[in-house]
């Protein structure tokens, strides 16, 4: 079924429904380059939970698909519009409803921008760790829907680790509260955790209660340059073997560094081929020891240059540069991004395999990784309009997925399945596990309206 | 339907089925004093996943209920036998299958004892934090089924935070692998997290992959005695307000202390009325600062005596004494244990309410709590055979549950719903949220054989 904007305008207060074709186009897809999409029938911008409930009730009654959308920064097509759907944008539901320093929790609407929440938390001496590279733009609702990770997740966990409870509109159009506000609780199934990472396929999340931490600790930054990705990978494995859990451990290769240099003239690529950026945040002498161990691991693995940064501004600039890699690469061509995660000690193997895959398929694969938790983001950049290179890139990325599975990893570390990883998910899960997924989906999304065709068929 | 031992003996290899009435009685219930149970039709002790699968297939085909059992140390009746059921004891599946110091994970069978796993981990310089008071006896399978907490969970999280993946036999009798081995992963729904804490109602867990931490840090112990529970509660709130997250913060009152003294002659009750035991484990000077803040919070709240312990053996003895409270109380009478969790800052209110409830219902309620995370375990001990006191105790505990909900808490912090908290769960969840639970249960337990009647009806 499909909705018409005129029908939807009767469901919500005036001004909530957008139907201008140009506007629809800007809500039609996320940032996944190669995922299919269509124009939505309409875009709805509800302003409160009751409006979301009214919309879902109407869509359920009429069999109209509903696609939730945060900021559209997703990288797997999860927010892409499907035939006849209403895209529900949460941009107007963007309030931090409560912040409680003593209980260390916050209650937010889904449209709150990740960095904005971090700023509000910092004003209260609190910290919300999950920090996807998209944090200046992406929303907490989108982060929750995809169980987003980020840089400091290697030590502090991913979005699911911070979601205590939530409010959602489910398939009946009813509003449901799940989870809790207390530190612990085992009352019933973990339906909160089930909703986190379900990519809009089980309901629409309208409010989120997040656990917070105390103030972000002081961090020491250790920098190392390596002659190639495999050598850097050995340094990552050595740090894990030494028992150090850094608060960030990022890998950025020359391709990425040059792209950032082209935008920001930082001279990053002048110093070496593959950069590892580590942070250590244990308090006091323990943190200094961690930093020393990381530095020693860098050198033992074969760093061509390494140092503990003594300049906080310089260190921050390096991490800002890391966040600029995607936009910088996009200026060079079409970006095909991968997101596999392998056991930490397999990082060197995986990086070596990626180098081989790049050679075999005649594509250049930029190296970018949350290396400390084995979450690799190899990026293929193909010249705009070069269909042959693009086709080779797609094949290469499928090879990367297969190799990650062969090494005991997963097809998606933090970007989600969306449309791009459906084949990978089916390869990772057994038919029996996939059947359980379908059973859960059918049980909660009884009319099949929530983001149909995403994650699995 | 019901099974006969003779029928079951044909399903599994010889020696797996127990049917002696005395033996059946010892597998008929857990340690929840007031939960109903019956004799099981049989007890099965499978030795491998394939045997579990064969058993579940047979039970599904014949509509025979299956009740999973670890060590039977549960406190909510979750493992209690139901009419015609087969109790599946995992005591013969007790191997630590793998321990991987570099990836910091272990793969275990469900029957492994918690303390045994801790010992094995320690030999490899690793640490599995979840430490329920039952850790000398309870199994990892039972811990996972109930999402067990413990003393150090205030800082290090509960069982679910450590379960990376698992193998389970589901309603079809099929064996399913869920989750992952990598540090991160968002491939599909979090069915692993859904199984954790599902109390045997969604399937039987046959193997568990657990995340581990590096070696347990050195801890400083701070001890404070208070004139009453409410004053101690204010100290707990003050520590939270000061931003300190201790690695344990336990409350034990005179009733409990005297019970332990009666067994161990430690003189614990001589020093004061309500004991708070705190541990701080940040490295180096940071940990010393934490301990100083805890000590200052104790004193500011009104401690009658307080000290940072300088004797590690003495400090360990205090925590051992804390673990002995349940068995010590059981020698004094029938123990009715509660398990509510409230927001941390509500601990003083909740403790004051419990004192009022004890007075109104003329019962003595022993104070025992993982106070740092707001998880209170008020314990009523009634003389054996005093049915009137027991009846008053039951009413008092229902009042405690209602008060916890009124303060924004939950009816069960870590013991699970089982049979005892079904009313509380229904009071905590909305009808819509309960409907979602039923939908998930029906979707995964298609023949309704898994622990029927537990958690919700």
Image (cartoon, coloured by chain):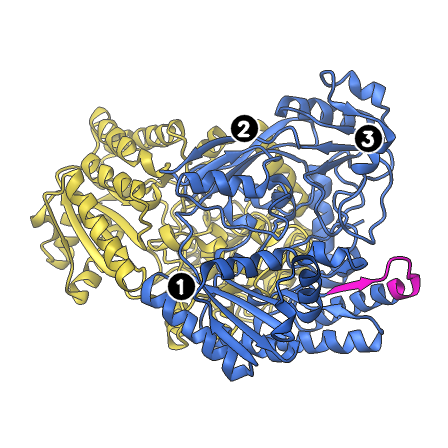
Chain colours: A yellow, B blue
Chain that bears disc 2: A
Which of the 4 image quadrants contains residue B143?
Answer: top right
Q: Secondary structure at mark 2?
A: loop
Q: Is residue B57 left or right of residue B218?
A: right
Q: Secondary structure at mark 3?
A: loop
Query: Residue at point 62% right, 24% down?
Result: B48
| Label 3 neighbour load within 10 Å: few <14, some 14-19, many 20+ | many
Magenta-colored stretch includes residue A422: no
Q: Residue A250, which numbered label?
A: none
Residue B41 position, x and y percent, is: 85, 30
Q: Which residues are magenta?
A: B379-391
- Cα–Cα gap, marks 2 and 1: 35 Å
Q: Residue A114, which numbered label?
A: 1
Q: Nearer the viewer, mark 1 or mark 3?
A: 3
Give the residue at mark 3. Answer: B64
Query: Residue at point 39% right, 43% down?
Result: B125
Which of the 4 image quadrants contains residue A187?
Answer: bottom right
Q: Is residue A61 left or right of residue A276?
A: right
- Cα–Cα gap, marks 2 and 3: 27 Å
């Amino acid at each position: 079924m499909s909705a018409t904007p005129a029908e939807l305008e009767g469901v919500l207060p005036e001004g909530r429904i957008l139907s201008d074709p140009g506007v629809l186009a800007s809500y039609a897809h996320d940032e996944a380059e190669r995922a299919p999409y269509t124009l939505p029938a309409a875009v709805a911008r509800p302003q409160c939970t009751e409006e979301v409930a009214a919309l879902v009730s109407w869509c359920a009654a009429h069999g109209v698909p509903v696609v939730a959308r945060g900021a559209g920064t997703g990288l797997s097509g999860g927010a892409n519009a499907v035939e006849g759907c209403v895209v529900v944008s949460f941009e107007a539901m963007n309030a931090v409803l409560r912040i409680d320093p003593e209980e260390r929790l916050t209650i937010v609407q889904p449209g709150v921008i990740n960095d904005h929440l971090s700023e509000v938390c910092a004003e209260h001496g609190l910290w919300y760790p999950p920090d996807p590279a998209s944090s200046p733009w992406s929303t907490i609702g989108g982060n929750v829907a995809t169980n987003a990770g980020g840089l400091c997740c290697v030590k502090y966990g991913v979005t699911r680790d911070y979601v205590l409870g939530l409010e959602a509109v489910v398939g009946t159009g009813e509003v449901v509260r799940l989870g809790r506000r207390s530190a612990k609780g085992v009352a019933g199934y973990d339906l909160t955790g089930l909703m986190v990472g379900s990519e809009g396929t089980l309901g629409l999340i309208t409010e989120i209660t997040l656990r917070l931490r105390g103030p972000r600790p002081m961090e020491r930054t250790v920098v190392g340059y390596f002659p190639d990705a495999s050598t850097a990978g050995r340094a990552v494995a050595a740090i894990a073997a030494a028992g150090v859990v850094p608060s960030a451990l990022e890998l950025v290769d020359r391709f990425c560094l040059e792209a950032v240099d082209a935008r920001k003239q930082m001279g990053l690529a002048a110093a070496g081929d593959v950069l590892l950026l580590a942070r250590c945040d244990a308090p006091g002498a323990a943190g200094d020891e961690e930093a020393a161990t990381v530095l020693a691991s860098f050198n033992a693995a074969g760093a061509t240059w390494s140092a503990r940064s003594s300049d906080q501004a310089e260190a921050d600039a390096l991490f800002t540069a890391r966040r600029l890699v995607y936009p910088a690469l996009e200026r060079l061509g079409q970006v095909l991004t991968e997101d596999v995660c392998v056991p930490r000690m397999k990082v060197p193997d995986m990086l070596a395999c990626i180098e081989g895959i790049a050679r075999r398929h005649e594509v250049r694969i930029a190296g970018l990784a949350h290396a400390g938790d084995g979450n690799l983001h190899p990026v293929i950049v193909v010249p705009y309009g070069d269909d042959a290179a693009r086709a080779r890139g797609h094949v290469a990325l499928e090879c990367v997925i297969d190799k990650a599975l062969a090494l005991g990893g997963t097809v998606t570390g933090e970007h989600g399945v969306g449309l791009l990883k459906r084949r990978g998910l089916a390869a990772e899960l057994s038919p029996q596990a996939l059947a359980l997924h379908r059973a859960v989906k059918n049980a909660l999304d009884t009319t099949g309206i929530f983001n149909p065709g995403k994650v699995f068929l």
